[in-house]
Image (spheres, coloured by chain):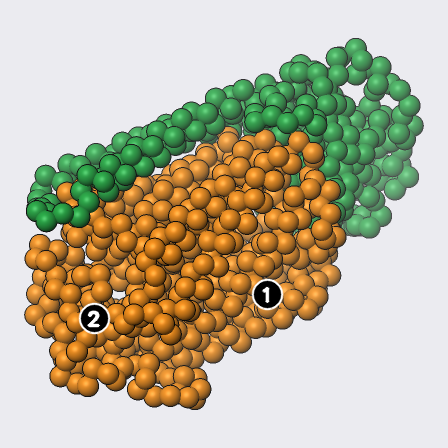
Chain colours: A green, B orange
Amino acid sequence: MIGRFSLLPEQASTIAGQVDALYFFLVALSAFFSVLIAVAVIAFAIHFRQSKDRQVVPSGEGFLALEITWTVIPFILVMIIFGWGARIFVTMHTPPDDAMQVYVVGKQWMWKLQHVEGRREINELHIPVGRPVKLLMTSEDVIHSFYVPAFRVKQDAVPGRYTSMWFQADKVGEYHLFCAEFCGTQHARMIGRVVVMEPAEFQAWLSGTKGSGGDMVASGQALFEQLGCQSCHQGETGARGPALAGLFNKQVTLADGRTVVADDTYLRESILNPQAAVVAGYQPIMPTFKGLVSEEGLLELMTYIKSLPAPKTIPADATEPGKTHAMLPVHGGQG
Amino acid sequence: MTETVVHEAHDASVNYLNADYGVRSWLFTKDHKRIGLLYLASITVFFALGGLAALMIRLDLLTPAGDLVRDDTYNKLFTMHGVVMIFLFLIPSIPAVIGNFVLPLMIGARDLAFPRLNLASWYIFNIGALFAAWALLAGGIDTGWTFYTPYSTMSSNSNVLSGAFGAFITGFASILTGVNFIATIHRMRAPGLTWNRLPLFVWAMYATSIIFILGTPVIAITLLLMMIERAFHIGLFDPALGGDPILFQHLFWFYSHPAVYIMILPSMGVISEIITCFSRNRIFGYSFIAASSIAIALIGFLVWGHHMFVSGQSANASLIFSLLSFFVAIPSAIKVFNWTATLYRGSVRLQAPMVYALGFIGLFTIGGLTGLFLSTLATDVHLHDTYFVVAHFHYIMVGGALMGYLGAIHFWWPKMTGRLYNETLAKIAAIIVFVGFNLTFFPQFVLGFLGMPRRYHVYPDEFQVLNVFSTAGASILGIGYLLPVLYLIWSMRYGPKAEANHWGAVGLEWQTSSPPPTENFDHTPVVTSEPYDYREPVEVKKVA
Ligand code: HEM
Ligand SMILES: [Cu+2]
Ligand SMILES: [Cu+2]
């Protein structure tokens, strides 16, 4: 907990115990080898200290066995450590599907967070205990890093792209939130706290005063209309732009023949830098929205796009406009 | 080791130090020994500068509120400390000072292959270093020694350009030294000095030179690209201009990880020399130690991504970089085991250089083992960019590299100056350094595990206790470093004269007088046996 001196950090997430088990295994291993070396050095230095009848180790084949032993044993040990660490790391990179999303924007020198339900926070993150939480993060300026020691997780927030991390708090309380990547004058003051609450309490908190009116889908939709996106993306056959429903995490074929997955960073690029990846079958007419929409606005737009219900069936024939074009680039090639 | 012992044919009172007098004779010297001393003078000044910054940092961290200096000043202090210690002190330290001085002596050569280039490298180093030092002192730089983009290119309004340019220039000095060493080792070995008879320090210099030549151009280009983006707003790393900030990190660590081996390999070479001499034993596993130096130098080029596990690099890349990092730990472990085994059935003398060498083994072992914590993906996510990393690299770079450097200075001091320092004081200093070092940096491992981020000017109250320990240790450490400066300078004037082979070592450099004549040897020595052949007691020759 914040403010109390201790030699062990608090464990407050499901992953923390696993990381610590590995950490203490490494501590034990290191202690063993350090003591082994120290004892050997001291014992040899004393036992073989300078004296008249000194003998010299003859060189010989026999030592090859020793060299191999102390190459192979550490090798096996480090491979175990690698595998162990990799397994936990893969877990850290595999958020459960039902994870609750929170959006994070770092800027010099504060953390801005927004819940899907609309509630915004600065330098504080409220979450319910016992529920996986996934953060989608970016930065407005330089690189920052979102670090919650009690959860044993850390992830850089990088400008121009999205990174994500997830965790599941398993203990109610308040924990430090630090920026771990040096970001300028007040880097050390870019700190805050994570407040882990009982689910009921969290629900009450969430529906308390809202930051910006509606939830993120609603504000995203408002922005979508305000920026005129729907004039091209109304989702009908023959529209100037592809339909966006069900787009998220689908394969998209581009005019230059590449296929990409429409992940967060792709959506972002499509809005800020549409000419960089033109969907096959469409003209490169979408204007750039760089400078017209803030990082938070982008996240709202994306939340809205992701919320659009995917079309029921994947059409084999041309009943769904954008997708069909994407698969059969009829007039894309010469465009 | 050789057939020739000390030849006192020439006038033994004439040596490289008194063969010529005056400032000009130093500034225009082509003698590798004098150039080594010139480098010694330069980097000692920079070490003092970096040390002063460290002192301010530690004092400031005594209190959680960081009462001594302001935020920006603090950031400039740790940048100054890092840039100076790494680029202006540790990278040139052993290669340019000790390597310059003893490498030709060790292989029985009269000088390096390109003496003029050698002098040029000293000038280039100083020009770059003074440029960087000026940038750091007049106005300062606040990016950290890592210059991460886009902070360094678009956000920082400090002297990034001139500082990076200074570091860029010093790179050329490194490259010249590397080329010179490789050419010398290939072409100028004494008759009979085959590759498998080379002293391990020479092998270490060879491995280091490979990194100098392969790695330095990459950091030079990286810094150049960074400067171009900063000066002309050409988008390379800043996403706002269409660049990729992670690309900078890849380029930076592609050099800077191998650079950490530039700092440690030479020390490892020194330790092999000292351990054998002071245990009067042949080295255990000669070929394993030599091969592991080369293995470290080469594998070291493939692990840079272990600095970027949480940067947003793909998880698959992280898995591979983690695996490769473990491979590079193995040769380091092999060396430690072999040094320890060298003591076995030797005849151990605990003179000052040996005390430093044993201290090195202890601290390097801890530094290397904690490298495992950081190569392990799951633990690094927590420990990255915390004080744990700070402790890790100080154990290796200060506990290891600097300890090795001090050991080397103490070992070859009689050869370099022809004078002896006070043994007792030297041993006491070594012990003070060892104790002070551990007190300073061990608490930082705990701080890191507790979650204290690095580069923090202010910190939560619960971290204060350990920070106070660390600052206390740093004061002890400071005294430990000051002592050698004093008694070594004192010895140059008042120390007793040294014999040709003060320690009774077998290396070729001990077969000529102390200090050596300008041309190193009166007759080219001929090598007839393996290195570290301590079977016959070595005569301690008196200077005539
Ligand atoms: C024994 C094998 C070693 C291993 C496995 C190892 C591993 C690592 C890893 C994984 C990191 C990145 C930690 C992080 O930022 O999260 C790291 C950082 C570092 N290591 Fe090592 N290391 C080893 C040896 C060395 C040596 C020999 C040196 C220097 C002489 C060194 C100097 C450094 C430095 C300077 C950093 C931090 C750079 C920075 O972020 O400012 N390491 N090490
Ligand atoms: Cu920061
Ligand atoms: Cu590294």
Q: Which of A313 and B213 is in front in this view?
A: B213
Q: In the drawing, what numbered circle is on residue A219?
A: none
Q: Which quadrant of the view contains residue B231?
A: bottom right
Location of residue B402 in the rendering, given as x and y in whole percent from the top left corner? 42, 55
Distance between the Cα atoms at labels 2 and 1?
44 Å
Location of residue A320 in the rendering, given as x and y in whole percent from the top left corner? 72, 29
Q: Nearer the viewer, residue B315 or B184?
A: B184
Q: In the drawing, what numbered circle is on residue B500?
A: 2
Location of residue B384 in the rendering, given as x and y in whole percent from the top left corner? 55, 39
Q: Is residue B244 visible?
A: no
The residue furthest top is A200
Tags 2 and 1 both on a single chain:
yes
Name the residue: 61% across, 62% down. B226
Q: Report which residue position mark 1 lands on.
A: B164
Which of the two labelled residues, at mark 2 and mark 1, occupies the earlier sequence position? 1
State which chain disc 1 sits on: B
Name the residue: 19% across, 45% down. A49
Q: Which of marks 2 and 1 is in front?
A: 2
Label 2 CB sits under 8 Å from any ligand 1 atom: no
The secondary element bearing badge 2 is classed as: loop
Name the residue: 59% across, 54% down. B55
B202 in relation to A273, above or below: below
Please give the count of numbered marks on the rendered protein.
Answer: 2
B4 in relation to A133, above or below: below
Q: Which kind of residue does numbered mark 1 sit on?
A: Ala
Name the residue: 36% across, 42% down. B362
Q: Is residue B412 visible?
A: yes
